[in-house]
Image: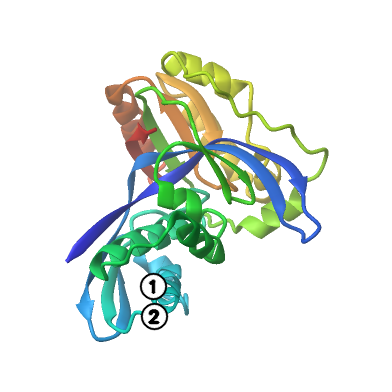
Amino acid sequence: MISEFAPAKLNLYLHVVGRRDDGYHELDSLVAFAGVGDRVLVREDDKLSLAVSGPMAKGLQNEPDNLVLRAARLLADMFAVKQGARLELEKSLPIASGIGGGSADAAAALKALIRLWHLKPSDDQLLSLGLKLGADVPVCLKGKAVFMQGIGEKLTPAPRLPEAWLVLVNPGIPLATPPVFKARSGPFSAPAAFEATPNGIHDLVRLLRERRNDLAPPAISLVPTIADVKKALEAQNGCLLARMSGSGATCFGLFAHEEEARMAARSLTVSQPSWWVAPAPLIG
């Protein structure tokens, strides 16, 4: 059996910088990951199959063609693989939540199957495969801090990020990405990638405060509870910055110390028992 972790993806900032003729928006974002996520397990088998378990499995029961299976089929087709695989997705991240759960699952499945089937794809082949599955899959295949531009195909290594802790909070309201982009209005933002390595967590927070998530206002217009989540995080002792990730509805708080993050998570769990709350280290 081969196991791959699928960490939650975070957009530490996200600028919408333009729109292409085909309707896709061009982005500029600093993407990092959190030490909380799903897990994909693969075993040898005669055919491809998928079982889903875990606390968030129910949200995928009505999904006819999970992204994990699509990833497996595309990889098998690309390399003419004849054998199958039995896949299991342990689903812990909320569905349609702006933290790349489905994309991270697909990326983890690809990594696991590449090992199971002894494949050696090139970087270009993996990028092409990832983009066929979704704009966030290539960055999830990287699994470390990068600046993501274009529609997700342009990935540049980011400076080393400082050690920090996070609290991720989702109000339990799925929010699909297309309606958020449709609700966005106003001018486009400028790209804002930086080259200097942040000198500690407070310097990173300063850099992030000079940037924003352009999708937060349209997401809040669709799900006003997101604003409540952000305010609740901001009210926690030690929270240096609270922001929505991706197209929502998950928000994250940045903390300098593990104990502060864990205390904040406990406080939020008690005050809002229906929310999904998870403390985790920042993976830079």
Figure quadrant of the C terminus: top left
Image-based side of 147 in relation to 111, left or right: right
Question: Is residue 57 depicted above or below 284 in this figure?
Answer: below
Question: Is residue 168 depicted above or below 4 in this figure?
Answer: above
Q: Residue type at mark 2?
A: Ala
Q: Residues within 10 Å of mark 1 (few under 14, many from 20)?
A: many
Residue at point 68%, 51% (across, down): 222
Q: Name the residue under label 1.
A: 72
Indicate the position of residue 141 as horizontal and vertical percent values: 42, 52
Q: Nearer the viewer, residue 78 or 187?
A: 78
Work out whether residue 179 can be spotted: yes
Figure quadrant of the N terminus: bottom left
Q: Nearer the viewer, residue 136 or 238?
A: 136
Image-based side of 16 in relation to 53, left or right: right
* Element marked by disc 1: helix
The image quarter containing residue 278 is top left
Choose the circle earlier in sequence order: 2 or 1.
1
Q: Mark 2 points at which residue?
A: 80
Image-based side of 74 in relation to 134, left or right: left
Indicate the position of residue 198 as horizontal and vertical percent values: 47, 18
Q: How crowded is mark 2: few (under 14 residues within 10 Å), some or many (20 or more)?
A: few
Residue at point 69%, 57% (across, down): 179
Residue at point 31%, 66% (across, down): 119
Question: Is residue 52 depicted above or below 229 in this figure?
Answer: below
Residue at point 81%, 58% (across, down): 21
Indicate the position of residue 250 as horizontal and vertical percent values: 50, 45
Q: Residue type at mark 1?
A: Ala
